[in-house]
Amino acid sequence: MATVALSSIAKSFGSTKVLGGVDLDIADGEFLTLVGPSGCGKSTLIRIIAGLEHQDGGGVAIGGSRVDHLRPHERRVAMVFQSYALYPHMSVRANIALPLTMSRLSLRQRLPLLRLLSRRRREVMRGIEADVGAVAMQLQLDHLLDRKPAQLSGGQRQRVALGRAMVRQPAVFLMDEPLSNLDAKLRVHMRTELAELHKRLGATFIYVTHDQVEAMTMSDRVAMMDSGSILQLGTPSRLYEKPASLKVAQFIGSPA
Ligand code: ADP
Ligand code: MG
């Protein structure tokens, strides 16, 4: 089970209040999108769920347990960034494998001189290789595993970043504007890919975008944010047909 429950999440940077007590319950397996204008606090909220930022007040629960004391890699979440955050000197294979090499190999086993000697290390590496292969197959990256990020298209790089998140088999995927660096045509194509991936994995997706069309086409529910709070939460058609305020109507582009 990977529900995500946010209760009264508050956050300020210095004297600037960025989140004013956000409550939000996300269902297991849901595709929930946080949408809203630039600067409204979307990234801060998703970073708090990931454990990359800490809230001043309130709590985060994942799968029914509070995770506020847990570090990012202990939270069963994986984050996909807009900038891909790939290592340019490493192959696609090594980029996707990174979370596994970090968690399954000891520091000692990562040392170049000791590598060749250790049978245990070879076993672990075979397991990692199999997991990376399975993910690469799902994302149609299997023929690109030996390339470096610079030798890939934007869409392929984005899929590598997704692969790096998938390889840990997280219960919750957190995506912060993952498509915003792609050109318009590819962005539309990747929307479909992401929606299919969500169905296939059955994981909970929390997706951040400032693009209302993206929010309306992919999501089970949309949370429309403004100035650090949620103005309205509902299905895309609900927000479109019954916007709770003029602000929501204007942002979503509904006729009301
Ligand atoms: P969004 O993702 O919706 O564009 P953010 O969560 O990135 O919004 O930012 C919300 C507000 O918090 C902005 O005014 C931004 O300048 C501010 N902010 C975000 N991160 C920091 C930080 N580390 N230090 C200071 N201010 C920040
Ligand atoms: Mg942002």
Image (tube, rainbow, N blue to C red):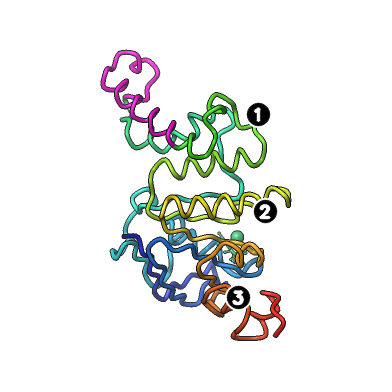
Disc 2 under 8 Å from ligand 2? The reply is: no
Q: Which residue is mark 1?
A: 151
Residue 71 appears at what percent x and percent y? 36, 52
Name the N-terminal-most of marks 1 and 3: 1
Residue, x 29% and y 23% (percent of image)? 123
Q: Which residue is mark 2?
A: 188
Residue 116 position by quadrant: top left
Q: Magenta stretch containing residue 111, yes or no?
A: yes
Q: Amino acid at mark 2?
A: Val
**Residue 146 higher or lower than 154, as above or below:** above
SS state under label 1: helix
10 Å crowding of disc 1: few (<14), some (14-19), many (20+): some
Q: Which residue is mark 3?
A: 226
State whether residue 165 appears in this view.
yes
**Residue 96 higher or lower than 234, as above or below:** above
> Which one is in front in this view, the residue at disc 1 or the one at disc 3?
1
Numbered range of the magenta stretch = 109-134
